[in-house]
Amino acid sequence: MDKNKKALLGLLILLAFATLVVIGTYYYVTSTGENSPVTDLIFKYHFEFMLFLGLGGIAVGAFSYYLLGHEVVVQKEISRKNAGVLFELLDHSERIIVQKLVEQKGKARQYEFAYDSKLGKVKAHRAVKKLASKGVVTIEKLGKVNSVVLKPEILDALSE
């Protein structure tokens, strides 16, 4: 089935379920208290009705995940491949910095690159500036210290 058709079908099922719950709730809230066959049935079998709605919600969620879950896996794989290509296009000092950022969950101080990876202050500074100009990292000024933050989508792709 086409991915657009799957998405539309999943959305329609979710909307139908939500509409059913809203109409049922509205009917229950606006009932005048008189005995009607629907409210008598709901009150008589309220446990079964709640169980049915809960299982229906789980079924709708599972079916929607089944329809759309493959798309998420495909997107993650594409993201991982793109991050690998990005990593190969970086020079040695930039790779060291990105590896260090991935190890530290995407955030580190700029001076840590100079001391921990033995790049030197100037080389680390230049590599961070190049990464920032490429859009791989952002630099946050913290007084006289720079905090370097790896883009979240790149971090997610490289950390897997």
Image (cartoon, rainbow, N blue to C red):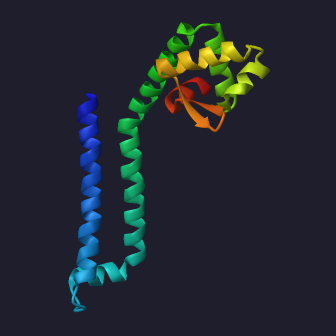
Q: Who's the residue at 51% across and 11% down the image?
A: 85
At which x and y percent is residue 42?
32, 78
Expressed as whole percent of the image width and height from the top left, the position of residue 83 reads 52, 18
Q: For the view shown, which residue lies furthest in the bottom direction?
A: 34
Image position of 24 (left or right of 105): left
Direction from residue 3 to residue 137 in the image, left or right: right
> How many circles with numbers are drawn on the protein?
0
Question: Horizontal and vertical percent for residue 39?
Answer: 27, 82
Which residue occupies the extreme front position in the image?
144
Q: Which of the 4 quarters of the picture holds residue 119?
A: top right
In the rendered image, the vertical position of residue 119 relative to residue 7, given as above or below: above
Left or right: 52 as drawn, with respect to 130: left
Q: Is residue 53 left or right of residue 100?
A: left
Q: Report the residue at 44% width, 20% height from top.
A: 78
Say which residue appears at 46% left-offset and 29% top-offset: 73
Asked whether the viewer can see residue 16, the reply is: yes
Is 48 placed above or below 62 here? below
Q: Residue 45, position in %: x, y?
A: 37, 78
Q: Nearer the viewer, residue 11 or 113?
A: 113
Q: Is residue 12 above or below residue 121?
A: below
Picture quadrant of residue 3: top left
Q: For the C terminus, give its image quadrant.
A: top right
Q: Quadrant of the N terminus?
A: top left
Relative to residue 71, is residue 15 depicted above or below? below
Q: Nearer the viewer, residue 63 or 95?
A: 95
Residue 160 in sight here: no
